[in-house]
Image (cartoon, coloured by chain):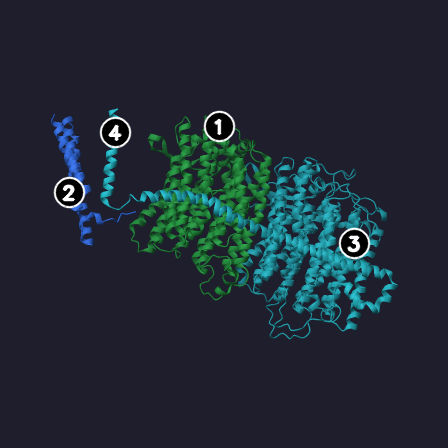
Amino acid sequence: METITDNNWLLTVLVFAPLVGALIMVLIPQQDEQSHKQVALLTSLVTLGLAAFLLIDFNYGKAGVLQYFADAEWIEVIGAGYTIGVDGMSLPLIALTALIMPLVFVYSWNHIPEPGNAKAFLILSLILETGMIGTFVAQDLVLFFVFFEVVLLPMFFMIAVWGGENRRYASLKFFLFTLFGSALMLLSFLALYFLTEADTFSMLVLTENAGEGIARGTQLLVFAGMFLGFGVKVPMFPFHTWLPDAHTEAPTQGSVILAAVLLKLGTYGFIRIAIPMLPEAAEAWAPWIGLLAVIGIIYGALGCLAQTDMKRLIAFSSVAHMGFVMLGIATLTDFGINAAIFGMVAHGLITGMLFFIAGSVKERYHTLEIKRLGGMLAQAPRLGWILGFVSMASLGLPGLAGFWGEFPAILAAYEPAVGLSEKTFHVYMVVAAIGTVLAAGYLLWLLQRTAMGEPPAEFADDPNITDVSTTEWIAWAPLLFGIVLFGVAPGLIFEVTDPAVGQSLNNCITLTGCEVAEAAASSGSGGG
Amino acid sequence: MLLNQFLLLSAVLFCIGVYGVLARKNGVLVLMSIELILNAVNINLVAFGALTADVGGEVFALFTIAVAAAEVGIGLAIVLLIYRNRRSIDLSEIDLMKG
Amino acid sequence: MSFLFGFAEPSSVPTSSTVAHSANWFLEYAWLVPLLPALSFVGILFFGKRMRYRGAELGIAAVSLSFLLAVCAGFAWIQHRDNFVLPDAASGAPATPGESYVAVQNSTQWLQSGGVEFGAGVLVDGLSVMMLLVVTIVSLLVHVYSTDYVGDDKRYTHFFAFLSLFTAAMLFFVLSDNILQMIVGWELVGVCSFVLIGHWWEEKPNSDAALKAFLTNRVGDVGLIIGTITLFFAAGGGHTFDTIKINEAIVQGEVGHTALVVASLCLMAAVMSKSGQFILHTWLPDAMAGPTPVSALIHAATMVVAGVFMIARLYPVFFEGMQIGGSSINLMATIGAVTLVFGGLLAFVQDDIKKVLAYSTVSQLGYMVMALGVGAWTAAVFHLFTHAFFKANLFLGSGSVAHAVHSFDMKKDMGGMRKFMPKTYITFIIGSLALAGLFPLAGFWSKDEILVGTGGWGLFGGTGGNGAYTFHLLMGVFGAALTAAYMTRCVYLTFHGEFRGGHAHGGHAHGGHAHGGHEHGGHAHGGHAHGDPHESGPRILVPLYILSGLAVVAGFANLPAGFQLVGDSWTERFGHYVEPYKSSYFPAIDHATPSWSLAVVASVVALAGAGAAIYYYFVKVDRLADQTQQSLTELPDGLSKSNALAGAGHRVLVNKYYLDHLYEGVIVAFTKGPLARAAYWVNQKVIDRTVDKAGETAVLVGRHVYDVVDQSVIDGFVDGSGRVSDATGEELRQINSGKVQNYAAILFAMAAVLAGTFLIIFAL
């Protein structure tokens, strides 16, 4: 398969730059919090700069091809290589990760959660960044797995150390759930290795092979393993219960990272690994994925309606939103998968932003109980308006980013890939559309209870309740801008992902969308 | 065969060492018993090295001695610290590692 | 980057075949019209507070410019249309597809995904130019009016920002050349409506109303989304959102019937929610919680007609899907007919002047939808046009009165306002007469056209029309009587009789009319002499004059053919320039010929309605009030009871006129009493309750699912596995004594076992 190897040092530097920063921070004494913050921010800014260079230098005409491709030997015995590369599918997610982290560090400038220790907190965040970017560039299953797991530990500690009251329970639940999924995922990777003739973990080779020579029953099982592994991370109903707990207990920064990037590792795994490598099994599983996705949409929304805690509500809304993403994926059309990638980025921006707001509300009111809040528009008008704006984005208002994750996913469900039952997916489509009403319901209800009305007596004269501070503005402005930008010009993302998705579906045997995808790949190559 | 005597000697030394490690309460004595065990191994290494005319056995023995020296240094330091803290080196009283 | 939002390149490659030859500059650059208010929104948002007039000047300037551009576009369109000769004018056949009609379309690629291109562009034809004019002029007048009306509001700047955004979104919506873009505009106007209804969010009823409006619209949006998607895939397999392409495919019969039925039903749900059709209309009266200028602009003149506009824009979908041609009943027409009667009935039992007008809006929207349902496209669009002016006039007039008495309650705080506000009174009367459809005001012409269009009037000797919609004709005529009657009541209670207001305003709590008190919360009551109410200032009156002027003349835009007083070149101008008749993207509808006898009958019925109301209010109630020395507040509104009170004195009179008895005792009383009450009861108790219950049930189900399934079953499973490992760990913990020597013992024991195992293995 064609690859472009120009400038292939770039990705390695991009992935490990945060780690270098973390190593430098190890050498700085713990008391010197200010330098820790500076180094962490600087490191993430360097990473962002590298990512920006990547965005500029990326050959958009060949977005379907792996670029900056590097392939070095790593563990020779098992044929695992240090193979990295980036194409249109991973580019938006890398950019998202690189963007979110500096914002997290800016926010951390005067919001280091209890019990302090900025050094450890920031180092963990940087390790997280390496893990996340690494997962998005890895082109080898073992490497992918390693990065995928690297993410797990820092997050575990983040929740377990800097979390809320119930942090031990939540962190353990998070850890066990994900580890359980990872174990099955690893089994599937190993099965792929042994069952294909090439004896390799290279994603390129396995994608090209597309499950050839593996018996159908075995394919189904292998896919099921990945399904669980990635599904837990997404999280799909019914593997989602770790999410509300983890989100509720995690410190603000942890929630933001979790919502903005971590959840996408699962969906990314589906579109990068599970579906292209085992298209036949994907086709068999797709109706079930779709079913769980729409159950997730409705269920997440109902869960939101029952919540009394703002942060928990936002967490539950993630279940619903990721349901739309999974519905797009389940259609197995390039259109649906494009929508899914867009949905991931949009959800990252929007829900990340919502968690930032929740953190700031908690800081001001010392509670997130919806019943006790109110009148934010009167006391902190800008905060209230931002909450309103982001709620609108989250409920899928056209013209803002959220819409382009939802509407195309619903659209794609009208005409799923050939071989999938149209009737089934039509039902999914209607259910998903109803989900948008519920989404409006819980978000507006949240908005009404927290932002509108008169401030409650207990907070009426609280001097703590101030409007958005400068650090918050700096941390939030890029997200708010991104929500508008991608809402107005969704082509910015679709244009990039489209060829890559087409390319990865190209190798399928029975799947449709191939002809369309090829046509798009040839016609779309002039764009950019 | 000469080898058998060496092996027998090392086995006896090893057993004495194991007894010392398991039975003695005094931390210093336990460390000394560990030395016995290590030396039992050394004897084996040298004996087999001589038998097979391979210098590797002697090299490993030297290596073990070096490591043992370091180990005993750290071990004694720990014992000393325990003594300073507790005014006792009775191992049966020390259960900080209880899970 | 070509995939950026494409408005920056209006001259980029046209993707539609339906582009005119060389269009006028104003038509080519029509996208400037929505762009200006959009820029003003951003400007006001960021810099408004620092401006001299707190942002209002920017909004007014932008909308004025938009209005000028729209006027120019209007003239350009007339010129453009005149220069164009319809193909096959002689045979009357529709143009062949590909051959251009007169619409000017500029589109560029918005995004491309999965091999599907989504365009973004503007479609300028008679319909959109007409809407541009209506939206910009009403918006401009409302802007001016608001500078006085909400002048003391603490969120004045914010108010103007959202007025601008609303104007931009609405203009964007009407200029859309594809349905996807229409969805964007549709939702954006919904959000503006949400924000502006909830403008005084401090009070819960206001934010409740805002939420209700948004959520009801969202319910309709499910239909909008599904309907749009169905059309996207169904239209000739073309994978397109382009309205003209979809319409052309349908007119050519390339689209399956099932898909059209599904699409039209789904879109109808969206129309019902947006345009306040029965049973999804309940949000509209509640939306009156917003400031009055907002009610005039959004909830009367423009946004609520978005649904009507969408039907008009995608008319082939509905024409084929609902089988409008050649039938005598269909869903759309029936929904419209039911809405117009029910809405009218409900207007009788309202004490809040804005609610009367709101139900009246519901009723008039019912007329428009019914007209579209019976195939009278031009009549519907024309009614939309005239209604915008007189309804905005009425709303702003009610605001002017409320501004003076600080309340919207007609019974408690108004009455006799004619003496205090003669100028407002005159404009209000003109608006009411136009609404009631009296010759020769605007409402007369448009309502008459709708009645003609039903085609169900063989009785009156007319011909043409798309079917025999007799039932709908009768409903329409009945509605005319209702309209006249409730407006008479409204005028009487507000402007005639004795002034009942002025009592204890300082600390007066306005009960259910939270917005009434709020709307003038900023007024410096201290220095304000609380004697008689006084006439409003020029910034309120001038918009009223202009709108009432338009309410008089707007009807002349589409005089019926054969109208004797003017030449043929002056009749049916509106239809000529707005309706894309005989084009490749418009169904072959049958135009009915106007009938003077029907007009006379309808006018007589309306007059009868007004007459009955006048008799009851101006004659009977006045007399009753004199006799009993009661103020109107204490007088019961139901006739049955007032009959009992008035009983003895009037028995002879009543017995003398059987007609009166019939009118008052049976028809009016029944209508006003049980029927209207029942309708209102259904409205409040059944539909509203269902909406509430549905919400409550959803929350209950959510809570139940959360408690039982989520927390017990699924979580229980996870926790269970955790507990098992926990218990195992507890057992194993025993070994972990912390004593070094125990560990050593285990170590050696294990080593011994291992050695034994080796021995056995190698020995064997």
Mark 1 vs mark 2: in front:
2
Mark with earlier residue (3, 4): 3
Question: Left or right of A493: which side holds B36?
Answer: left
* Percent of width and height locating residue C548: 73, 61
For label 2, the SS is helix
Which of the two residues, C107 or A283, is positioned nearer the viewer here? A283
Q: In the rendered image, which quarter contains the C terminus of chain C? A: top left
Amino acid type indicated by mark 2: Met
- Marks 3 and 1: same chain? no
Q: Residues within 10 Å of mark 2 (few under 14, many from 20)?
A: some
The residue labelled by disc 4 is: C758
The residue labelled by disc 2 is: B32
The residue labelled by disc 3 is: C478
* Percent of width and height locating residue A279: 49, 31
Which chain is cyan in the picture?
C
Mark 3 vs mark 1: in front:
1
The residue labelled by disc 1 is: A216
* Percent of width and height locating residue B5: 12, 29
Q: CA distance from mark 2 to mark 4?
A: 29 Å
